[in-house]
Image (cartoon, grey):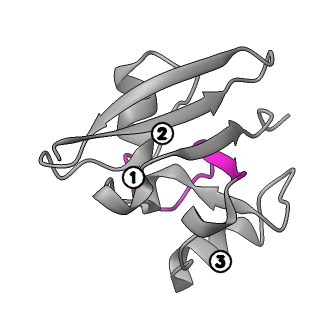
């Protein structure tokens, strides 16, 4: 399999069905940006800004937060139990069927 199906609900509630390649070493933030979803990724994927925060709606796809991600989320706005930074979620075959919602923008 070279692509996985990921469903994203944007900040206006619009549902987007995305195909994400598993063979390009991308992360979820990069996929959001490639589909021109409103995600800044200001830090370039270094887990230093939380502008790619999303809520993982499918528990089996939550994965593990690393220390940098935990630290950034401890300072971010609108953090929920299911919050992840898109830049810290590598696109793998295990993400097939994942559903995420973009977190509101920080104010």
- Decide which of tag 3 and tag 2 comes sooner along the chain: 2
In terms of secondary structure, where does tag 2 sit?
loop
Q: CA distance from mark 3 to mark 2?
A: 17 Å
Specify the label residue 41 is tagged with. 2
Do the residues bearing badges 3 and 2 touch, measured as CB atoms within 8 Å?
no
Q: Is residue 46 magenta?
A: yes
In terms of secondary structure, where does tag 1 sit?
loop
Chief secondary structure of the magenta portion? loop
**Range shown magenta:** 44-57
Query: Residue drawn at (84%, 52%), measured in percent from left and top?
Result: 77
Name the residue beneath numbered marker 1.
45
Q: Quadrant of the C terminus?
A: top right
Q: Quadrant of residue 71?
A: bottom right
Name the residue beneath numbered marker 3.
71
Do the residues bearing badges 2 and 1 touch, measured as CB atoms within 8 Å?
yes
Specify the label residue 3 is tagged with. none
């Amino acid at each position: 399999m070279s692509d996985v199906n990921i469903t994203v609900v944007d900040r206006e509630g619009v549902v987007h069905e995305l195909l994400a390649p598993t063979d390009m070493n991308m992360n979820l933030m990069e996929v959001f940006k490639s589909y021109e979803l409103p995600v800044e990724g200001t830090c370039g994927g270094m887990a230093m800004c939380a502008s790619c925060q999303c809520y993982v709606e499918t528990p089996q796809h939550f994965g593990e937060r690393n220390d940098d991600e935990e630290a950034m989320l401890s300072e971010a706005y609108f953090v929920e139990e299911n919050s992840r930074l898109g830049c810290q979620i590598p696109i793998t075959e295990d993400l097939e069927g994942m559903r995420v919602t973009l977190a509101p923008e920080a104010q």
